[in-house]
Image (tube, helix red, strand yellow):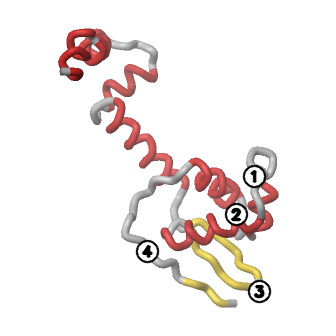
Amino acid sequence: MKIEKPVRSRNNSLGLTPLELDIMKPIWQRCPITVKDVQSAIHDSRALAYTTVMTIMHRLYLKGFLRRSLHSRTHFYEPAVEFADVRDAAVNGMIDHFFQGSRQKFMEFMNGAESESVMKEIREVSSPSSLDETLL
């Protein structure tokens, strides 16, 4: 059995594309796992060729999201990053991008209680006068 160490990329972000996330889900659920097993697990939602799944998993390995080991000519993959870490990074990114980093505004949105301050911000951003100023 040969265990390979992942190669770190320049981007150490925990962000995943939708395709990468779909491929990681079965890996988090059941590991170690082969490319063929991942392909079968996601087939209902994404009918991808074996080579496509293999390429994405290799890239995830290079990015440091996966560990892999070789057993008799077959690579077995395991997550190198926990689901909770990826989820938390995605939620924090959403809070930063859509709620100006305010967890309070995010919680108000999630509770359906859009506060007057949030509504005021939306009105200011989308008001015709602010649109006219940006067009000048």
Q: CA distance from mark 1 to mark 2?
A: 10 Å
What amino acid type is highlighted by mark number 3?
Arg
Q: Nearer the viewer, residue 57 or 79?
A: 57
The x and y percentages for residue 130 are 21, 15
Residue at screen point 65% across, 90% down:
2
Residue 24, relative to residue 65: is it above or below?
Answer: above
Of badges 2 and 3, nearer the viewer stands 2
Residue annotated with mark 3: 73
Residue annotated with mark 2: 53
Quadrant of the rendering where the C terminus is positioned: top left
The reply to whether dot 1 and dot 2 touch (C-beta < 8 Å) is: yes
Earlier-in-chain disc, 1 versus 3: 1
For disc 2, the neighbor class at 10 Å (few under 14, some 14 to 19, many from 20) is many
Q: CA distance from mark 2 to mark 4?
A: 20 Å
Residue at screen point 40% across, 13% down:
113
Residue annotated with mark 1: 42
Earlier-in-chain disc, 1 versus 2: 1
Residue at screen point 53% across, 59% down:
82
Number of numbered discs = 4
Q: CA distance from mark 1 to mark 3?
A: 23 Å
What amino acid type is highlighted by mark number 4?
Arg
Judged left or right of residue 90, residue 1 is right
Secondary structure state at the residue bearing disc 2: helix
Secondary structure state at the residue bearing disc 3: loop
Quadrant of the rendering where the N terminus is positioned: bottom right
Q: CA distance from mark 4 to mark 3?
A: 24 Å
What amino acid type is highlighted by mark number 2?
Val
For disc 3, the neighbor class at 10 Å (few under 14, some 14 to 19, many from 20) is few
**Tag shown at residue 8:** 4
**Tag shown at residue 70:** none
Secondary structure state at the residue bearing disc 4: loop
Earlier-in-chain disc, 2 versus 3: 2
